Image (spheres, rainbow, N blue to C red):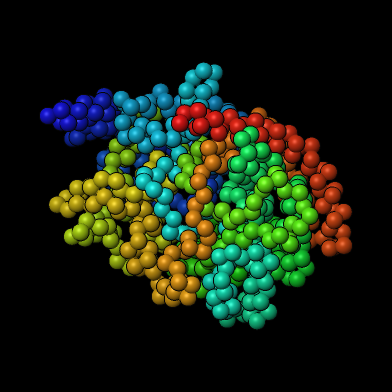
Amino acid sequence: MRKILAALLVLAMVLALVPAVMAEGEALEPITLTVFRGDPGDQPTDDNKIYKKIEEKFGVTFKFEFLAGDLDEKLGMMIAAEDYPDLFDGGNSADKIIEAGALINLLDYVSPEKTPRLWAHIEPQKARLIDKVDGVDTLYIIPNYGLADGEQIALSVGGPAFFLQKQVLADAGYPAVKDITLDGYFDLIEGFLAKHPENDKGQPYTGFAILCEDWRHFCLINPVQHLMGRPNDGEVLIDVNDPDFHTETFIDKPYAKAYYKKLNEEFHKGLINKDTFVMNYDQYIAAISSGTILGMFDQAWDFGTATSALLDAKMFENTYVALGPVYSEKDIEGVALPSENWKIEEHYLNGSLPNVRRGFGISTKCTCPERIVAMWEEMMSDEWQLLFNWGVEGEDYSITDEGRLSMTEEQYYNTQDANWKLANKAEAFTQSSPKKQGWIMNDIQVGDKVVKAGNCWEPGNQDEIVLGLMNDYDKEFLGHYGYSKWADFVNPPIELAPFGEAWQIDYSPVDVEHTDFCAIQDKDLPELIMCDPAEFDAKWDAFVEEITPSAKVFQDYMQEHVVIEAHKVLDNK
């Protein structure tokens, strides 16, 4: 009886938030929410089945605007005109719209009493997510990713790595690559190109591509920290074993010079094309989709559309393995390291991390924030999360007699087909909204069937789908290495540092210096890679001299705030 009363009380609290949204059988006033996504994207079809269900249940339709052009320029224009959509995703520059006062404080609407599902979602990581501004607790964005249930799932690498086409490893006889060095990585590409300068269509291969456009210049800049043995902290290197979390910019340090000198060598060997430095994102994706890019440093999510295109075309040999090279002793011989006891070990995979200040916020121009929050609250139910992740039962997936979520080969490959998703998924909305990830922790009743705890929220993490429906090429490829999953090519995830990942820190107070810091890198690093090798040392010294003033300001700021972020978590343990 107590459990029933408690459940009724929770329901009453939710109904009290927005009765019209939650009550069954009542007509809802139709509304259209304007939505801005800080990433490129495609409009869903008019007959998209998931958006139709949202409209039927919540009376809500969406008018999407996707990023076209430079993100910071676009946000600057929106901020200057105070032209804000209802749902506002500022992408990797979300701090700009927060600082501009464009978003409401969600804690005015989200609480254990009003929204128990949303609160349960954020509560385990509230020390990282909730800030104090002028003594007031604030939460502007509920993370779109990273608030996962249960232990971490690591079947593949979704983040940063040096990627290499599978055919390169196959052609080399499937060499051991678990502890590959930077030289070893490029040796494999050189060896393949020497035998196969073109594909069977007569198109020349590119050995190594570097995307430099806009905020995605992390493809040019970030490799150094990983070669030094740390996961992604953005633009600084941090000694997690130091009680003061020694923090320094890495791009201006001697150990960074080793990477760019290597790229200079590879450029003059013909592995890197000069066009790569002016390539925009769409051109980069098109090149990867063609199968002609043998290797690149990137994050797997960043070229996901290209991976889908290769899979659709059954060009399995042109898809990629994520590798984790680190510096060898020879690479940095005689070079000063960040600290006396610094040890280089491969740690490309980090522990589970909430995507702080990334996802939808509700703008101050929105006239119905309560209705959006109530919709999110209902959408955090198991039933809606199954719909968003798996689709319609009996049409997009099935439930076995044992309570396992299952897909046929055709159903699984549909989930990787961009055109199919525009009509059958609601990604333009759900990618930036709060969501369940990780393990399904409790049984879920679906009609007369039960989804048992122990399934995964995302089909891409479900063993019997990812491994059971794997194409024959990939099964054979993994078999040559004796591996069962793609994450086996790198070490298991490292424990997440108490400060999280430092790229999440708001550095808008030093935005001028940080902008200068980035602009110098974007200008000088391509020139360093392409310059005459005889001029490299002198140009490197000039680069370091030019960037040092802004680097020093940014470094000092990050040192201070890494410690602050770390103690927000450590002091709440």
**Which residue: 64% across, 54% down?**
344
Q: Quadrant of residue 518?
A: top right
In the image, residue 100 sits, relative to residue 492, either above or below, namely above
Tell whether 401 sits left or right of 31.
left
The x and y percentages for residue 202 are 62, 80
**Which residue: 73% across, 52% down?**
256
The x and y percentages for residue 224 are 67, 53
Q: Is residue 365 visible?
A: no
Q: Which of the two residues, 11 or 168, is positioned nearer the viewer here?
A: 168
**Which residue: 73% across, 44% down?**
519
Q: Which of the two residues, 43 or 472, is positioned nearer the viewer here?
A: 472
Image quadrant occupied by the C terminus: top left
Q: Farthest residue to the left: give it.
A: 1
The x and y percentages for residue 331 are 73, 60
In the image, residue 274 sits, relative to residue 546, either above or below, namely below
Q: Is residue 469 visible?
A: yes
Q: Which of the two residues, 137 or 365, is positioned nearer the viewer here?
A: 137
**Which residue: 51% across, 74% down?**
317
The x and y percentages for residue 352 are 46, 46
